[in-house]
Each structure stands twice: as structure tokens, then as C-alpha cells.
Image (tube, rainbow, N blue to C red):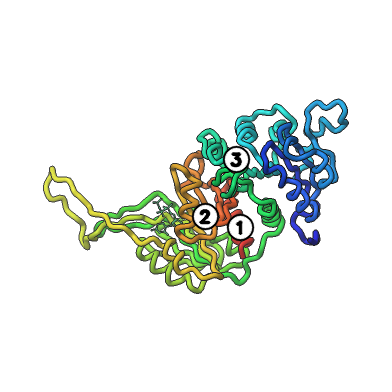
Amino acid sequence: MSTIGSPLSGKNIIVGVTGGIAAYKTPLLVRLLVKAGANVRCAMSQHAQQFVTKLTLETVSGNVVYTDLFDRDNPHSTEHISLKEWGDAMVVAPATANIIGKIANGIGDDAISTLLLSFRGPLFICPAMNTHMLEGYALQRNMEYLRRNGVHFVESECGELACGTTGNGRMAEPETIFNCLTEYFSLNTTKGSLEGKKILITAGPTYEKIDSVRFIGNFSTGKMGFALAEELASRGAHVFLVTGPTHLSAQNPDIERIDIMSAREMYDAATGLFPQCDAAILSAAVADFRPEHEADHKIKKQNDSDGMTINLVQNPDILATLGTMKQQRQILVGFALETDNEVDNAKKKLTKKNLDFIVLNSLHDEGAGFGHDTNKVTIIDRNGYITAGTLKSKQDVAKDIADKLSQLF
Ligand code: CTP
């Protein structure tokens, strides 16, 4: 493997190893990282040393391995403190339920957990455990909390487990973990150009008419979609921006704006444009339902005391339709707004609508979502690679989405 041009070349990576049988695979990961030109230092928990030796990791990494907070015989024993500045990224592989609980709750009682307490760089966690432990509510809560705080998870895989059962819980293969790190560093060092690409974006709300003066709508302002359009156009793409009613205006001359009102008009515009596009990002808050009948005059009150019932019918799902039209060369991106089991539901939407990645909007954070200038999103791709962002301006979120798109091109 050549190190030339590898995004990992020259990067300082800390590999933390905790006590699981999958620790026997960690030297392979270290070897891949070293071969790609990275400098690797390892830290191990006491339990990890039951599964893989310190000597093995010292041999493959070419560096001292940290195991103890207060080792009098080891002149490097306090280096876990300075290691936090040294590392460009840290990977915990395998990560037990115990270490994930410690990270989520700020507990530092050995070399590795103390280092994790103070490490502020990108953190990649590779869970490995029995399926029942993985599904436990406390662990799920801890993982959800860490994801929301920007921790990356390299998801465990299904297969035969050390306990003799079959299920989810096997640590991702060293190559998969290595690819995630490579992808992370390539995204953060090279911003690909989108010169010559045609990209469709949907933005804003849709209005579903009840009569000539009333409609059913939502609070979307279109800010996220417009920020995306500007970002992609600034990278050289020609953008078709299909937008619902909004007061926003597009600045870049490479943005071709198509104004629509209803979900069905957005559907017609989007399905008409998609075949000529290289990618589509559907950020619009499309009304799922519309009134069955639209009155062409203003509906009058019948009787002072009478109420009114409007029958609603479902609108077409634009994203799902583009998912069925999608060709091999095309990239399709959706948004998801979830209140419960956010990541699981977003993953289901990703598969069901045949997407390449999905942008999960946070509803739990102040300053994120409809109408705000800031947003907090988690990007989930079809390989299960998850990047949880922090609260940032919609322009910066647009940059992250554009980076991910460039990477896929
Ligand atoms: N979307 C769409 N057409 C629709 C509904 C949604 O194109 N009729 C797109 C949105 O633009 C977004 C994605 O689908 O990119 C997900 O929207 P969301 O409202 O989260 O989910 P739904 O698919 O509508 O499912 P549900 O409301 O049941 O969660």
C-alpha cells in the first residue's frame, strides 16, 4: 500500500483498546494505519490486556503503549495527558459498553478513560459486544447522547459472536474502520470541486390550497435549502432550486430558481429535472396531505354554530419517487425530521427511499430546525457511517453536506 496521497499520511492517531475478544483484530487496524503513513500510539485498559498483548501493539505501532495511570517503572506513564494534544483523531476499537458509559458520563478511572475525558479531537467508537448488551436501554441512551455531541460511531456488524450466538455486536472489520478514518481525513483536507455538476435542490414549505384565500402550510422558511444552493453553486455546480413560497432570494447566477406552490407542483418540477441531474438534495418540508377538494371561491360560513371538516388526501412522496428513478451515476440525498428513535428511523428512511445519505435534523436542540439561522444535523450514509455535527450556522451545515456530496462524486 502506498502512503503517497493517503489522507492519513502524517496524521497522529490514538488507538484505544478495551476489553473485548475483538481486541485481537486491533493490531491489524494499527498495521493498516501505519502502512498508510499515520503515526499511531495505543492505550489499553487492564481488561484489554487479557485479549491482546502490549508487546503486540508496541511492535505494530512502533511506539510505547499506555496502560497505567501511575506506572513508576514507565517514564511515559503520565503521557496520557500530553497525548490528548498529540492526537489528530482517536479510535476506540473495540469499545465495550463500559467504556462507552464512562465517556458519556465523564468518568476517568484508568489510563484510557482519563485520556478520553480530556481528548477534544474527532473520536471514533467501534462498539463490540453481545447483542443484548448492545440493545440495552442505558447503552442506547449513552450512544445517542455521544452521537448528538459529535462522536462518530463505526457501527458493529451482524454475525457469529464470541458468546456462541449470532446477532449484531461484532466489531466492524479493521478495513471498515480504516476506511472511515480515511474518508474523514479526505473530507477534511480536500474540498472537491463540483464544476460541471447539475444538482437539484428542493427547499421551503409547500402550500396546499383549501380555497382561493386559504391554505395548509408549515413553518419552513427555506433557509437550509437556499444555503445549500449557494454553497454548491460557489463550488461550481449548476443548481436547480425548486422552492416553495419564501421571502429569500438566491444570489449566485448559477442558481436557476423554479417557484412552486403545492407538493404536486414540486413533484412535477423535481421529477422533470432529475433525469438531467447528477445529484438531488431534497430539503423541502413537503406537506404530506392536501385537501381532497379545492374550492375556487372563498368558502363561506354556513351557519353560525356549524363547524367545518376538510377531508385530506396524501401527496406524492417526491423523494421516494426520485429513489425509484435514480440511475447508478446519480446521488440522492434526503432530510429526516424525527422525534423518536431518530437514528434508527432515519436509517430506515435511507433504505426505503434508496438514498445515498440522509441528513437527520435535530429537534432536541435549541437553535436547530425551522426558522433558525443555525442547525444541528447528523449525516448517515448507506454504509452506516454516521457523522454527528454540532450546532452551527446553516451555511456551515451546507458546507458539511457539500463536502459529503463531493466525496461521493
Ligand atoms: N419528502 C418528499 N415528498 C414528500 C414528503 C417528504 O420529497 N411528500 C422528502 C423531504 O423533502 C425530506 C424527506 O422526504 O427530504 C423526509 O421527510 P420527512 O417529513 O422526514 O419524512 P416522511 O417521508 O414524510 O415520513 P414521516 O412524515 O412519516 O416521518
User: What residue did someone put label 1 on?
Assistant: 404
375 relative to 334, above or below = above
Q: Are marks 3 and 2 in contact (CB under 8 Å)?
A: no
- Mark sitting earlier along the chain (1/2): 2
**Nearer to me, 374 or 41:** 41
List x then y, in percent, for residue 93: 68, 43
- Disc 2: residue Cβ within 8 A of ligand 1's nearest atom: yes
Look at 51% across and 46% down and name the residue there.
343
Q: Amino acid at mark 1?
A: Lys
As helix, strand or loop, the secondary structure at mark 1 comes to: helix
Q: Which mark is residue 358?
A: 2
Viewport quadrant of the N terminus: bottom right
| Gap in angstroms between the C-alphas marked 3 and 1 | 37 Å
| Front tag of 3 and 1 | 3
Q: Amino acid at mark 2?
A: Ile
Look at 47% across and 66% down and name the residue there.
257
User: What residue did someone put label 3 on?
Assistant: 163
